[in-house]
Every structure is written in structure tokens, then in C-alpha cells.
Amino acid sequence: MAEDGIRLTEVQKRRRRARSIAIGLALGALVVLFYVVTIVKMGPGVIANRPL
């Protein structure tokens, strides 16, 4: 039975992996940025005066 579909070369697989890692890192950096901006906008009292 013949396999249908696209077969990627090793170079294409490496490029896809590198692109996926870059997108993942950019997404992670964006999440961290949003977290930091949120904490800054709320003020430092949100962390310091929080009851346990």
C-alpha cells in the first residue's frame, strides 16, 4: 500500500523544529510580559499585603 502525503527532508524537519521553538519562546516571553505588566498595574501592595 502506497503512503500518501508529504515527506519532509531532514533540512525541512530541522527548520520546522527551529520555527516551533522560536514560536514557543516568543509565546512564553509574551506570557511573562503580560504577568509583569499586570503586577505593575495593580501595584506592589497586591503581593505584600496578601493574607495567608
Image (spheres, rainbow, N blue to C red):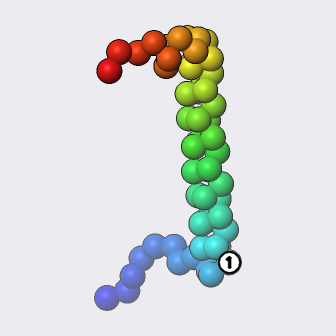
* Residue shown at 41% from the left, 15% from the top: 50
Please state if 15 lies on the left or on the right of 51 as rendered.
Answer: right
Q: Position of residue 4 (x, y in %)?
A: 42, 76
> Residue at horizontal 55%, vertical 27%?
35
Residue 29 sits above or below residue 47 on the image? below
Q: Amino acid at mark 1?
A: Val
Check the image and name the residue furthest to the bottom: 1
Q: Residue at x 65, y 64 (%)?
A: 18
How many numbered discs sit on the rendered protein?
A: 1
Residue 20: quarter of image: bottom right
Question: Percent position (x, y) of residue 28?
Answer: 57, 43
Q: Is residue 42 above or below residue 33?
A: above
Residue receiving disc 1: 11
Could you classify mark 1 by the number of other residues whose Cα lies within 10 Å: few (under 14), some (14-19), or many (20 or more)? Answer: few
In the rendered image, the vertical position of residue 3 relative to residue 5, given as above or below = below
Q: For the point 65% across and 54% down, which residue is it?
A: 22
* SS category of the residue bearing label 1: helix
Q: Quadrant of the C terminus?
A: top left
* The quadrant where residue 26 appears: top right
* Vertical relation: 24 (above or below) 33: below
Q: Position of residue 30 (x, y in %)?
A: 61, 35
* Quadrant assignment for the N terminus: bottom left
Please tell me which residue lies in front, 39 or 4.
Answer: 39
* Most foreground residue, 50 or 29: 50
Image coordinates for residue 9, horizontal then vertical, percent: 62, 80
